[in-house]
Amino acid sequence: MSPDEVAAFERCIARGGVALFPADTVYGLAADPELASAVERLYALKGRPADRPAAVMFFSLSAALWVLPELGAGTRAALGRVLPGAVTVLVPNPARRFPLACGPQPEVLGLRVPELGGALAPLAAVARPVLQSSANPSGGADASRLADVDTAVRAGADLVLDGGELPGTPSTVVDLTRYEDTGDFEVVREGALPRGDLDARLRPPR
């Protein structure tokens, strides 16, 4: 991944486009999370129902925490123990930020901060958040290589970035909406980060 490709990615999102890009898990689609026409195009490319939530991806944890100042201290500390990483975290969203990403639950936000190393490290310079979803038809298999992405999805994207072969397992989804009050969390989807690792990072010390 080159700085020029990263700049092209940012221009694509800023202009309301849909980009196909490599994350730390699988190939994804990205769009401006606050531009309805871009989000609608992304969902149409996937054949994804409009009422299903998606994640908002930040490319640094500090940027995410700056945009979400209402998160409690316990939740912020928990995010620091699991992010960046192959985790999608559901957090409280009382300010109803990024409503296009939230579906029928505007007070819950899916948050991603990928761990970008090696060839993907330049992507960590991306300054803007994106609405992100896996680059596959809704319900289809995740893609670990660009060649594995459905041809219609590739053709419909405004920008396509090749990051080589990725791990191929989607992110683990963990619900932290009750964590601030109770210390409880729920694994909604098993994925790249094992449950045991989550337990070790999120269980409060006794």
Image (spheres, rainbow, N blue to C red):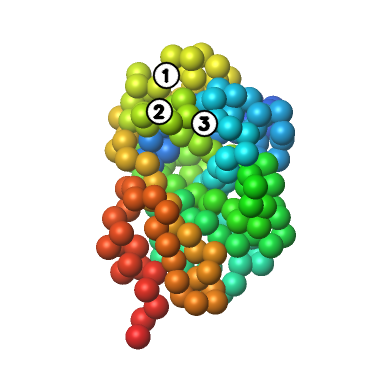
Q: Quadrant of the C terminus?
A: bottom left
Please provide percent x and percent y for residue 34: 70, 40
Q: Nearer the viewer, mark 3 or mark 1?
A: 1
Whether residue 71 sits left or right of residue 183 in the image: it is right
**Which type of secondary structure does the marked residue at label 2 adopt?**
loop
Instruction: Tell me the kind of residue under disc 1.
Output: Asp
Location of residue 24 in the rendering, given as x and y in whole percent from the top left corner: 38, 41
Please name the amino acid that badge 3 sits on. Answer: Leu
Residue 166 x, y percent position in the rendering: 32, 34
Question: Which residue corresponds to the image point at 44% horizontal and 14% vertical from the top-left?
Answer: 151
Q: Which amino acid does label 2 sit on?
A: Gly
Give the spatial CA distance, label 3 vs label 1. Answer: 12 Å
Bin the neighbour count of mark 2 within 10 Å (Cα to Cα): few under 14, some 14-19, many 20 and up. few
Answer with mark 1 or mark 2, whichever residue precedes in sequence.
Answer: 2
- Residue closer to the observer: 71 or 161: 71
The residue pinned by badge 2 equals 140
> Which residue is the site of mark 1?
150
User: In the rendered structure, are the residues bearing label 1 and label 2 in contact, judged by CB atoms less than 8 Å apart?
Assistant: yes
Q: Camera-side residue: 21 or 72?
A: 72
Q: Is mark 1 on a helix, strand or loop?
A: loop
Question: 10 Å neighbourhood of mark 1: few (<14), some, or many (≥20)?
Answer: some
Spatial CA distance of label 2 from label 3 is 14 Å
* On screen, residue 110 above or below 78: above
The residue that label 3 is drawn on is 29
Q: Which comes sooner in the sequence, label 3 or label 1?
A: 3
Q: Which mark is residue 6?
A: none
SS under mark 3: strand
